[in-house]
């Protein structure tokens, strides 16, 4: 007899085709109905979608929270292990860990257990290093759906590129294969029996899983009676849960390594990495702020005896985590949802900036005057070179006392804005009138400095006395030539790079989930004539400003069979900064998106690319560039050489790396390597796409997803003499994690780090949970063990900040709690 485990559940998209508050009212009704069902049938079981945020959302407005929690304690209802179900490609590994840790805090607050299975039902594919995170959190089973690409493999072992391994049960027919969809009892009975027979044919296991639920579906009150009625000598149907089910399974014999993003048998909706780019950039910058500035500064304050920031830190992290559910961060919701996401991220970012200021004040005391700067380096290595910031000073000529190089340029702008660098001053002035400085000017400041690892440098600003020093060259930099069309040429270490950064535009008849061309009518900037101006030239950098207009079709044609005959101008500004001290070019782009229904990419013609690497949570992910010749009509989505990245894509054979800030989609085409800048679409979901079989959601107009208006992008190009993994990470991190500058004359903090990093990069340096010290986490992108020496009492912990054991120990990522 086969045992049919029926897991009754609801998949709860917190916000999607309706706003959060509308969905929450349905959630309250669902849970109230569920509680009534369980009160009448104490053998009833239900799974709340793996998310504990549901408990928070319900508790805020319901009087029945205590009843819900009691049924969770008794085992009738399963929650967790996650706080939310995020997209796995648009977040960092540290965000995944915060997600779990906050869920654990909620479980302790509510005194309820968390499910010990990593339930990942609806993510749009899975990151190559997700097994690392799951194992490091102490779990050894995952249940997931999309991206496996092997419809005949229900159980397998999933390995990260570094070898961390977990077991996986693959939801081959999705998380709703036994949903009732409002059908009558007889049709529902036929459905679950048919589904059980279908799965049994492809499984040698005695235990079969049916998922009785789908998006926002209410539970059937009399389900247990139905299951008794359909049970027979061949099949025993009964309500169960995921923990009970996987406990009956054998470990997977098939091994799958790395990223799960195949669209062969399940839609992975891969182009969500470029939908609503404004949200992606806002999220990237906010996540970067908390991981690399807020938490390290608070950890340093903790080492000095300050421990009053925990609640404020989690307030900011919650806003970030609440923006990470897959429909939210992927930009595949209605316009109101996207506006809510942007608002949360803006609040989190502003809150994080002020936390940085509070931590600096705790470490240094109050600033003596405006005429100085304190510069913080969050990295594990010394940073030296040219850095830039914005300051507010009386109108005059200024310099940095004792600096080898400083350069102040007044910024002509209208209106008064408190600069980010003045946030600490704003906190400490006794009168807000003193913080307005209405007669001051904004200055763009470039300065040379050496800043110790996880350390500070204080600088004084004075009226100019000395000329700018011309410093000697430090290594070999880039010799850049700007072409007439605004693209750039350079040569390094025997390689010629030509026409880098030209723009290419094609139509997009897709939706928020998938790009879909019609006739591939392209336009590019190669034949344009740009306006080229010198912006700045120093002994360190040359900066050029480029401007031109792209003439593009206004939208798709009325019959949706091509592009409109009506054209519009799209203004483009590009700023190139070529470094004389290293082989690197920084690029800033400003685009006023004036047209609809298109995809705009920036192109790097590198010649034939056979393979490339993108970054996962703790290392690189290798991708082969395929030809994709043949018939793929039977695939759920058409395959393409489109790759997800967090912040870098590198091509070792071309000795070339791109370091991005919120641009998460790379393509390889006949033109070369491309980064998607903007994908403008007007529908949440559509049918009849050329790239996808079926709809991915409701067919709702979303005019905001056209992303009209001004967008600003930043990325860097790195050129390598010899491609080296450690150098790729070292140089990329130095670009992304720039020193933090606060204006003011501060005392230099007395920071004595109780550790010395010998090998590896900082993944986290943060206050430990439960007021129990400071956490240091290191990773090695090659998968070998990091090395560090300590001068204080420490204990090794896992990613959940619990005692490390054989289940949760991972080699390439190690964590320690420093006891203070």
Image (spheres, rainbow, N blue to C red):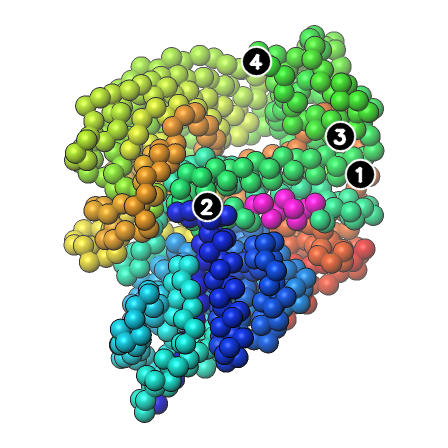
Q: For residue 681, what is the image quadrant?
A: top left
Q: For residue 259, what is the image quadrant?
A: bottom left
Q: Which residue is mark 3?
A: 427
The answer to which of marks 2 and 3 sits earlier in the sequence is 2
At x 63%, y 66%, the residue is 66
- Helix, strand or loop status at disc 3: helix
Residue 362: numbered disc:
1
At x 65%, y 23%, the residue is 419
Q: Nearer the viewer, mark 2 or mark 3?
A: 2
Q: Which residue is mark 4?
A: 413
Q: Is residue 172 above or below residue 406?
A: below
The answer to which of marks 4 and 3 sits earlier in the sequence is 4
Decide which of 744, 516 is in the foreground and name it: 516
Q: Which quarter shows the C terminus?
A: bottom right
Residue 691 rendering spot, x and y as whole percentages: 24, 47
Residue 471: numbered disc:
none
- Helix, strand or loop status at disc 4: loop
Say if residue 122 shows up in the picture: yes
Per the model, the C-alpha gap separating discs 4 and 1 is 33 Å
Q: Is residue 178 left or right of residue 317?
A: left
Per the model, the C-alpha gap separating discs 4 and 3 is 24 Å
């Amino acid at each position: 007899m086969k045992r049919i485990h029926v897991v009754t559940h609801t998949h709860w998209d917190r916000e999607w085709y309706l706003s959060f508050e509308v969905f929450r009212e349905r959630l309250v009704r669902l849970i109230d109905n569920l509680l009534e069902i369980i009160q009448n049938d104490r053998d009833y079981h239900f799974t709340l979608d793996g998310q504990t945020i549901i408990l928070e959302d319900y508790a805020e407005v319901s009087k029945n929270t205590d009843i819900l929690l009691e049924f969770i304690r008794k085992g009738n209802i399963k929650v967790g292990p996650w706080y939310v179900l995020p997209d796995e490609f648009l977040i960092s590994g540290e965000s995944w860990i915060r997600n779990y840790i906050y869920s654990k805090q909620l479980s302790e607050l509510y005194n309820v257990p968390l499910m010990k299975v990593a339930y990942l039902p609806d993510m749009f594919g899975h990151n190559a290093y997700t097994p690392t995170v799951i194992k490091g959190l102490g779990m050894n089973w995952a249940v997931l759906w999309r991206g496996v690409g092997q419809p005949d493999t229900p159980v397998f072992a999933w390995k990260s590129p570094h070898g961390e391994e977990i077991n996986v049960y693959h939801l081959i027919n999705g998380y709703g294969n036994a949903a009732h969809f409002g059908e009558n009892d007889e049709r529902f009975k036929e459905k679950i029996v048919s589904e059980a027979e279908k799965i049994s044919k492809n499984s040698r296991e005695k235990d079969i899983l049916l998922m009785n639920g789908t998006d926002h579906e209410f539970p059937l009150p009399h389900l247990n009676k139905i299951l008794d009625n359909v049970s027979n000598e061949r099949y025993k149907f009964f309500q169960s849960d995921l923990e009970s089910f996987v406990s009956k399974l054998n470990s997977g014999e098939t091994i799958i390594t790395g990223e799960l993003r195949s669209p062969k048998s399940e839609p992975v909706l891969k182009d969500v990495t470029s939908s609503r780019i404004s949200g992606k950039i806002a999220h990237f910058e906010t996540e970067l702020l908390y991981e690399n500035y807020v938490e390290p500064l608070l950890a340093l304050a903790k080492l000095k005896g300050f421990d009053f920031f925990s609640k404020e830190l989690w307030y900011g992290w919650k806003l970030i985590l609440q923006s990470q559910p897959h429909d939210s961060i992927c930009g595949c919701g209605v316009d109101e949802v996207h506006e809510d996401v942007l608002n949360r991220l803006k609040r989190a970012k502003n809150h994080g900036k002020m936390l940085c200021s509070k931590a600096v004040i705790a470490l240094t005391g109050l600033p003596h005057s405006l005429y100085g700067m304190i510069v913080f380096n969050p990295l594990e290595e010394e940073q030296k070179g040219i850095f830039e910031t914005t300051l507010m000073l009386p109108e005059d000529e200024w310099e940095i006392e004792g600096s080898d190089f400083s350069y102040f340029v007044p910024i002509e702008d209208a209106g008064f804005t408190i600069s980010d660098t003045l946030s600490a001053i704003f906190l400490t002035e006794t009168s807000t009138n003193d913080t307005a400085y209405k007669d001051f000017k904004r200055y763009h400041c470039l300065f040379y400095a050496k800043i110790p690892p996880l350390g500070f440098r204080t600088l004084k600003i004075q009226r100019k006395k000395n000329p700018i020093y011309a410093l000697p060259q430090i290594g070999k930099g880039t010799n850049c030539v700007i072409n007439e069309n605004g693209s750039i040429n350079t040569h390094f270490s025997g390689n010629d790079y030509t026409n880098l950064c030209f723009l290419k535009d094609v139509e997009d008849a897709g939706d928020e989930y998938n790009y879909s061309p019609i006739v591939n009518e392209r336009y590019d900037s190669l034949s344009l004539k740009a306006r080229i101006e010198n912006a700045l030239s120093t002994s360190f950098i040359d900066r050029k400003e480029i401007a031109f207009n792209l003439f593009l079709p206004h939208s798709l044609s009325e019959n949706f069979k091509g592009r409109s005959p009506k054209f519009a101008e799209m203004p483009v500004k590009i700023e190139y900064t070529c470094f004389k001290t290293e082989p690197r070019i920084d690029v800033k782009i400003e685009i006023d998106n004036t047209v609809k229904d298109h995809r705009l990419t920036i192109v790097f013609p590198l010649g034939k690319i056979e393979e490339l690497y993108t970054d996962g949570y703790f290392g690189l992910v290798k991708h082969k560039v395929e030809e994709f010749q043949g018939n793929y009509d039977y695939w759920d989505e058409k395959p393409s050489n489109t790759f997800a990245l967090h912040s870098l894509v590198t091509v070792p054979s071309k000795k070339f790396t791109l370091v991005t800030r919120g641009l998460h989609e790379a393509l390889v085409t006949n033109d070369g390597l491309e980064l998607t800048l903007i994908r403008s679409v007007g529908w949440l979901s559509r049918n009849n796409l050329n790239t996808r079989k079926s709809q991915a959601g409701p067919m709702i107009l979303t005019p905001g997803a056209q992303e009209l208006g001004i967008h600003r992008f930043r990325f860097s190009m790195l050129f390598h003499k010899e491609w080296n993994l450690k150098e790729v990470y070292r140089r990329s991190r130095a670009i992304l994690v720039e020193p933090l500058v606060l204006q003011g004359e501060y005392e230099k903090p007395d920071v004595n780090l109780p550790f010395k990093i010998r090998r590896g990069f900082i993944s986290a340096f943060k206050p430990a949970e439960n007021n129990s010290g400071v956490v240091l986490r290191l990773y090695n992108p090659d998968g070998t063990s990091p090395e560090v020496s300590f001068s204080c009492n420490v204990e090794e912990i896992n990613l959940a900040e619990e005692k490390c054991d054989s289940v949760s120990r991972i080699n390439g990522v190690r964590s320690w709690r420093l006891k203070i």
